[in-house]
């Protein structure tokens, strides 16, 4: 994510199964079919319990849910901008990681009409933004199951302590669903934490004449009775906050690059100019970053530019970043494009295991801006480091990027001190080891989740030296570290 200067300046329970008609645990003493068609062994005793109402992230304990792992979402929604009304059916393919009597999905505000698990009606209840599903039979650990949720209503945004308003926003000509660290739950039921990545299929039906953009490869569109359905598919695992829905009137540019589709959309609310030219440079920037980080990790390229005063940031929505028009108000800006494209490797393909490690996303993406500027004839990465090292505020040094706290998740320290940490590492280990590290990190953790500890361990292995002191000072200290020198 990239925040505008204005945004940076602003600083950036569970219903018991018994209440739903089932006891909190059960047994399978006789051979009985489960909800997914499997059969428990005769004589086996199983204790079925509800899945947790959160994954236990230190910063956002209630985000996501426990007890299952999702492999694919199929999201079909219809949105009427005039009535600001959304109807949808989402199919969730998952596997139980424990013996479940019930499980949660995150869904904010919308009214649930029905839920099935493996085709059988399931009981459901709500507690705040949690949808609690109780299948007819317990789900056995290791077995797959399919949940289908039908829902409708007027979608509403969420307000979180890290960024402010995010999620589904009604606009003058459509809607935008966007935000970090959460947004997906405002328009479909989801396990809303980056530790549970999944593939996605989207079918978005809107009034004829409007465009509906989402993630991944365009899979066609069709128009019937004054409504157009746009289809998108993201085959690579994706963290839920990286999903997006943008509906409105756009200038669309389509093409192909290296056998992958390219799809750009710029709001017609902007005159043609800097925004169009900037995102047209997407494939050039991606090719440069590919030379630094290794193969581009996804099946499509693109970008979306929106003009809405509530969105003052750019977000690395997978394969197709969304940019606020404000980034192009002063002219072309390929720096922000470089930042969001770098996230396709670091943040999207290699994703957070926990929100505390956000510097791994933002520090590496900010450093990619420095590398791109140097490649594009601007100041060097060393010069960019020097300017920030000398001129940064005391608050930046008092906020450790490796432990920023939930309210400072998108603070200047995470971005700028995060990038300075990356440069300090480069200077300490030398260019050969540094660039080998970047490619190795991207390759070994592709489509997976990762932590700071894992990054440090790999850096030490590649460099052949102990780096605890460097990372302790740059990531966790509360004073400005000494300027790095070559080791």
Image (cartoon, rainbow, N blue to C red):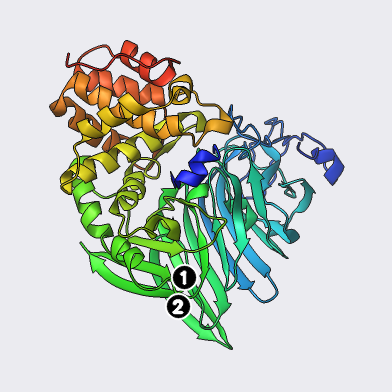
Image quarter of residue 263:
bottom left
Q: Which residue is more in the foreground, 160 or 463?
A: 160
Q: Give the mark nearer the N terminus: 2 vs 1.
A: 2
Q: Residue furthest left?
A: 432
Give residue 145's position: percent from left, percent from top: 59, 50
Give the structural element (helix, strand or loop) at label 1.
strand
* Separation of residues labelled 2 and 1 (CA atoms): 6 Å
x, y percent for residue 301: 32, 60
Q: Point out which mark residue 221 bears.
A: 2
Query: Residue at (40%, 55%) from the top-left corner?
Result: 327
Quarter the N terminus occupies: top left
Please provide percent x and percent y for residue 480.
38, 17
Query: Are there few (<14), some (14-19), or many (20+) residues within 10 Å of tag 1?
Result: many
Which mark, residue 463?
none
Mark 1 = which residue?
231
Identify the residue at image location x=66%, y=36%: 62
Q: Mark 2–mark 1 contact, CB under 8 Å?
A: yes
Q: Considering only vertical position in the picture, is 135 above or below 12?
A: below
């Amino acid at each position: 994510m990239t925040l505008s200067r204005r945004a940076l300046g602003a600083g950036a329970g569970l219903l018991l199964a018994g209440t739903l008609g089932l006891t909190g645990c059960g047994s399978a003493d006789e051979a009985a079919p489960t909800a997914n068609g499997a059969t428990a062994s005769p004589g086996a005793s199983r204790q079925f319990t509800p899945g947790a109402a959160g994954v236990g992230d230190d910063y956002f304990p209630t985000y996501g849910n426990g007890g299952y792992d999702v492999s694919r979402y199929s999201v079909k929604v219809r949105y009427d901008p005039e009535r600001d009304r959304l109807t949808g059916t989402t199919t969730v393919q998952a596997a139980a990681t424990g013996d479940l009597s019930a499980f949660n999905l995150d869904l904010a505000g919308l009214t649930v009409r029905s839920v099935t698990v493996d085709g059988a009606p399931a009981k459901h209840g709500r507690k705040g933004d949690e949808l609690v599903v109780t299948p007819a039979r317990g789900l056995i650990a290791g077995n797959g199951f399919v949940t289908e949720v039908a829902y409708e209503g007027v979608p509403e945004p969420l307000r979180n302590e890290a960024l402010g308003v995010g999620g589904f926003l009604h606009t003058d000509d459509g809607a935008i669903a966007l935000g970090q660290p959460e947004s997906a739950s405002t328009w479909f039921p989801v396990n809303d934490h980056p530790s549970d990545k999944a593939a996605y299929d989207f079918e978005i039906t809107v009034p004829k004449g409007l465009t509906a953009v989402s993630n991944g490869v365009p899979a066609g569109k069709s128009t019937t009775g004054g409504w157009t359905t746009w289809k998108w598919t993201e085959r690579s695992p994706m963290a839920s906050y990286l999903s997006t829905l943008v509906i409105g009137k756009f200038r669309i540019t389509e093409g192909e690059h290296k056998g992958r589709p390219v799809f750009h959309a710029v709001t017609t609310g902007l005159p043609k100019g800097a925004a169009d030219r900037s995102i047209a440079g997407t494939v050039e920037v991606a090719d440069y970053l590919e030379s630094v980080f290794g193969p581009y990790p996804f099946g499509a390229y693109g970008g979306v530019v929106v003009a809405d005063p509530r969105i003052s940031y750019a977000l690395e929505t997978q394969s197709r970043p969304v940019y606020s028009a404000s980034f192009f108000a002063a002219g072309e800006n390929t720096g922000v494009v470089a930042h969001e494209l770098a996230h396709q490797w670091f943040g999207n393909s290699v994703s957070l295991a926990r929100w505390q490690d956000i510097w791994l996303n933002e520090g590496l993406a900010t450093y990619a801006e420095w590398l791109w500027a140097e490649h594009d004839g601007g100041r060097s990465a060393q010069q960019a480091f020097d300017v920030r090292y000398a001129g940064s505020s005391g608050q930046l040094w008092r906020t450790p990027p490796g432990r920023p706290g939930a309210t400072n998740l998108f603070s200047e320290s995470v971005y700028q001190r995060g990038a300075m940490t990356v440069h300090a590492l480069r200077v300490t280990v030398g260019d050969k080891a540094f660039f080998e590290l970047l490619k190795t990190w991207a390759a070994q953790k592709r489509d997976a989740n990762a932590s700071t500890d894992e990054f440090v361990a790999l850096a030490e292995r590649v460099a052949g030296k102990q780096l605890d002191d460097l990372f302790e000072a740059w990531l966790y200290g509360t004073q400005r570290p000494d300027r790095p020198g070559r080791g």
